């Protein structure tokens, strides 16, 4: 089972973006939250920032589309050659079609579920998925506290995935203290924003995360 750490650049200092990216070059992915102010109550950034990140870092991109009707922009985001594009279950009308289109564009396909969204519908699209993202906070803002009830949801999702080659990602309130619990529940991909970029030494914090995961 491959374990991966994905710093969320939403928590980075954008007045020194290149320097912030230099601090997390040992990460496995860069998690990029694209927010439209409609699907979630916040606006983050779009293609120009993603293009700048792409030019400034060799770490593969993990683009999380927290937007309504993401199908309109799949080609634009796929053109940035990310490893993964994730759409929200609640924001698409025909999920299987959307996931298939992402794969047609040469990108791994992910789906994200908000805390209140049940897992049931995913059992019908497992063959179309490379990643499932369980939101462990309500999406839209960084720095929120982890919702404890999501541990059970992570366990249920791991059971649903079974032996399928699908990453189980968690995002929201993730830090070095709760990593062993999340790993035990079945998560394999850990998104952390404030915990990493708010640390005095982000690179050292990523090392601490890896140590915690090895011990867990």
Image (spheres, rainbow, N blue to C red):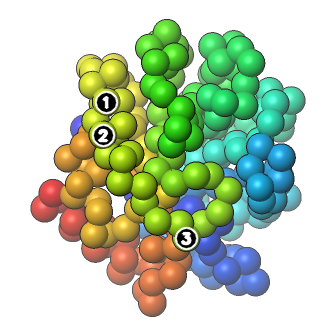
Q: Eyeballing the image, is 103 above or below 177?
A: above
Residue for badge 3: 143
Q: Mark 2, residues whose alpha carbon is within 10 Å: few (<14), some, or many (≥20)?
A: few
Quadrant location of the C terminus in the rendered image: bottom left
Q: Secondary structure at mark 1?
A: helix
Q: Mark 1, residues whose alpha carbon is within 10 Å: few (<14), some, or many (≥20)?
A: some
Q: Is residue 102 left or right of residue 143?
A: right
Quadrant location of the N terminus in the rendered image: top left
Residue for badge 1: 156
At x 62%, y 29%, the residue is 89
Q: Eyeballing the image, is 100 above or below 81?
A: above
Q: Are marks 1 and 2 in contact (CB under 8 Å)?
A: yes
Q: Measuring from the top left, give residue 8's x and y in whole percent.
A: 56, 62
Label 1, label 3: how many angstroms apart (C-alpha)?
A: 25 Å
In this orientation, which residue lies closer to the viewer: 200 or 56?
A: 200
Label 1, label 2: how many angstroms apart (C-alpha)?
A: 6 Å
Q: Are marks 1 and 3 in contact (CB under 8 Å)?
A: no
Residue for badge 2: 152
Q: Residue furthest top?
A: 124
Q: Secondary structure at mark 2?
A: helix
Quadrant assignment, res 11 = bottom right
């Amino acid at each position: 089972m491959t374990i991966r750490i994905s710093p969320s650049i939403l928590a980075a200092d954008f007045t020194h973006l290149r320097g912030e990216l230099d601090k997390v070059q040992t990460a496995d992915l860069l998690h990029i939250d694209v927010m439209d102010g409609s699907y979630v109550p916040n606006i983050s950034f779009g293609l120009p920032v993603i293009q700048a990140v792409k030019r400034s870092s060799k770490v593969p991109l993990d683009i999380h589309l927290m937007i309504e009707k993401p199908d309109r922009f799949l080609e634009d985001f796929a053109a940035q050659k990310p490893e993964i594009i994730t759409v929200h279950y609640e924001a698409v009308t025909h999920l299987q079609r959307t996931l298939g289109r992402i794969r047609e564009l040469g990108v791994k396909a992910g789906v994200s579920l908000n805390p209140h969204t049940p897992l049931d519908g995913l059992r019908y699209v497992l063959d179309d998925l490379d990643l499932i993202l369980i939101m462990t906070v309500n999406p839209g803002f960084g720095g929120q506290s982890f919702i404890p009830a999501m541990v059970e949801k992570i366990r249920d999702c791991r059971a649903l995935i079974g032996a399928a080659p699908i990453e189980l990602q968690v995002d929201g309130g993730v830090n070095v203290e709760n990593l062993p619990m999340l790993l035990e529940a079945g998560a394999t991909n850990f998104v952390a924003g404030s915990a990493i970029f708010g640390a005095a030494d982000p690179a050292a914090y990523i090392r601490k995360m890896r140590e915690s995961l090895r011990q867990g």
